[in-house]
Image (tube, coloured by chain):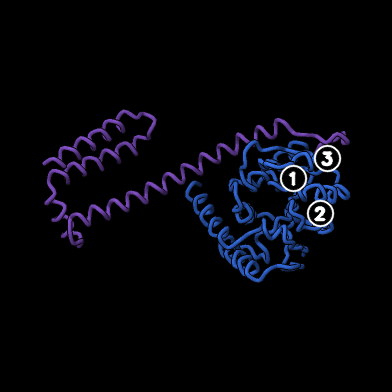
Amino acid sequence: MIVPAFNESAIIGPSVSGLRSRFAHVVVVDDGSADATASAALAAGAVVLRHAVNAGQGAALQTGIDYALARGAAFVATFDADGQHHVEDLVTMLAALQGGSQDIVLGSRFLGHAEGLPLARRLVLKAAVLFTNLTTGLRLTDAHNGLRVMTASAARRLHIRQDGMAHASELIEQVGRLGLRYAEVPVTISYSEYSKAKGQRLSNSLLILRDLFAGWLLR
Amino acid sequence: MTIQIFLTALLATVAVMVGLQRSTSRVLRLAVLAVVALGLYFVWVPEQTTRLAAALGVGRGADLVLYLWVVITLALIVFLYLKIVQLSRRLTELTRAQALARPQIPADSGDSR
């Protein structure tokens, strides 16, 4: 289980403990936090990889994936640190991946529940889904969900180059281009004041478009 | 005449600096030298800008120079931005290698995946 974290010391401990109750291997990538994120995650039983400087959530995910693959993981999952995801959903998704023939299983809050999701953010997310479906040709109901479970072979073929938040779109684009078999599983996202403060905003989506454009130019 | 001498000295300095800068790509060096040459031409034959501007459908020569300046500046900003993205990707690779070289393993666990 890969958990990217940037200044999450207030909540990383319980998040890791929750994951550790169901999964043996939890890797927290501390993306250059200035607070006690790393020590809190370590105390809760996670392996901690520390980025010396803040490189972005996409960069942190790829670091965690590299580590898990080097350690011989059979499955790799991504989980947000801010407490909006539920460990039970991850259990369901892993079971779906193990029982089915997919390469990657993506969480969807719109098939499941989005608790306390503000209207403005719902519209931004829906627009992102529309944009992603139009640009990738995939048919998804959720585009920027941090809950994903993939097989090791899928994880080896995907490579996140978008260091920032655009990695979510980039991953889906690669799933489409590589022809990976994917499925969506309904999940519940609980929006707390804490996660709302750290989540996506409208201004972020413009930055994501800019990053995607730059990535396209540099390809 | 005074401004012409000043501008010529300035453009010549740019040309020499860019010409000596071996680290810059050949294409970029040639592009800068071309811009400098065009600048020198316009500095010494300003009436040509007005004729060229009229031919292109722009009012005055000064306006043409201004528009060109805006376009060149915007292109430069995009170029520099892409350069920054490339640099930050290299920084990310460095950061990742360092993080992977020194994983922190929790005390209570023998395994470490």
Is residue A144 placed above or below A159 in the rendered structure? below
Which callout, 3 or 2, points at the residue further toward the start of the chain? 3
Q: In the depicted view, which residue is nearer to us: A57 or A135?
A: A57
Left or right, B19 with respect to A90, comes to left
Do the residues indicated by labels 1 and 3 lie within the same chain of the protein? Answer: yes
Q: Please tell me how crowded label 2 is: few (under 14), some (14-19), or many (20+) other residues with Cα within 10 Å.
A: many
Q: Please tell me how crowded label 1 is: few (under 14), some (14-19), or many (20+) other residues with Cα within 10 Å.
A: many
Is residue A132 placed above or below A34 in the rendered structure? below
Determine the colour of chain B: purple
x 74%, y 61%: residue = A192
Determine the colour of chain A: blue
Name the mark nearer the viewer: 1 or 3. Answer: 3
The kind of residue tagged 3 is Ala
Name the mark nearer the viewer: 3 or 2. Answer: 3
Left or right, A58 with respect to A8, comes to left
x 58%, y 63%: residue = A202
Quadrant of residue A130 in the image?
bottom right
**Which residue is under mark 3?**
A43
Say whether residue A82 is visible.
yes
The kind of residue tagged 1 is Ala
**Which residue is under mark 2?**
A94
Residue A36 x/y as whole percent: 74, 41
The kind of residue tagged 2 is Leu
Residue B79 x/y as whole percent: 41, 45
Label tally: 3
**Which residue is under mark 1?**
A152
Dividing the image into 4 quarters, which one contains the C terminus of chain B?
A: top right
